[in-house]
Amino acid sequence: MTGLIILNDFNTGFPICIMDASWVTAKRTGAATAVAAKYLARKGSRTLGILGCGVQGRSNLEVLAVMFNELKEVKAYDVNSENLKKYVKEMTERLRLKIRPVNSPREAVEGCDIVVTAGPILKHRDPVIEAEWFKDGGFACPLDYDSYWKLEAMHSMDKFCTDDRAQLIHTKSIGHFQDSPEIYADLSEIIGGKKPGRERETERIMSMNLGLAINDMAVAIKIYEAAKEKGIGTWLPL
């Protein structure tokens, strides 16, 4: 993944900073998952399933480990065994958590309080996650659209949320999420108190986070301000 962020002065439109977007996108995606989990996952969640051990599998684990300090076990799955092995070694050393590699999506989902799927977004989908694999009281956050979760599994949720209602509706128009559940709320409605988040311990809740570019810009501004304060970065003549 590649990307470039150009920050412009709000008043003049003059460019004030150029930065790589890949790292920013990775970190803000994990942060968005954590925000959703704060309102929709059970307090004291202890088990996490990560399906897809790439960049997003790493950034999501990093921030969820901070959000849920009672996290005791992570079950990790990837279709590439070498990627999985590298992920387990790297993230165990970095976070000092118990991270267990598993051999199937089912093993990664069953019994977990939180499940994050971070595989590729597929045009021709062959989803595998069944409704009965997912525990009552669990929270799921797919980052790969409807690539991993079967339609029946999505319909088994008591609440089907998203980070942006309009974007999900648009994404349906280009072929994803056909016959998907009715949207209960987007995250802004829940965070703003317009609709309740988790109301019962046994609720099965999914937040279909599609990714919002505005989040990249919000993070980029913070990075720019911190860089100025610390005097780091390269000044470019214009």
Image: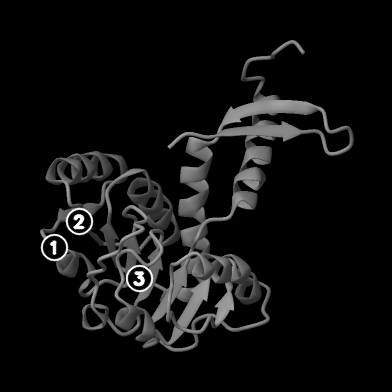
Say what secondary structure mark 3 lies in: loop
The image quarter in which residue 7 lies:
top right
Residue 205 pos. (x, y %): 42, 79
- Give amino acid for label 2: Tyr
Instruction: Look at mark 2 in the image and give the residue it sits on.
Output: 77
Q: Which comes sooner in the sequence, label 3 or label 2?
A: 3
Q: CA distance from mark 3 to mark 2?
A: 19 Å
Q: Is residue 216 left or right of residue 34?
A: right
Instruction: Look at mark 1 in the image and give the residue it sits on.
Output: 104
Q: Nearer the viewer, mark 3 or mark 2?
A: 2
The single residue placed furthest to the top in the displayed view is 237
Q: Residues within 10 Å of mark 3 (few under 14, many from 20)?
A: many
> Which residue lies at the image location 81% right of the left edge and 33% below the top edge?
9
Q: Residues within 10 Å of mark 1 (few under 14, many from 20)?
A: few
Instruction: Look at mark 3 in the image and give the residue it sits on.
Output: 45
Q: Is residue 204 above or below residue 237?
A: below
Circles 2 and 1, Cβ within 8 Å, touching? The answer is: yes
- Give amino acid for label 1: Ser
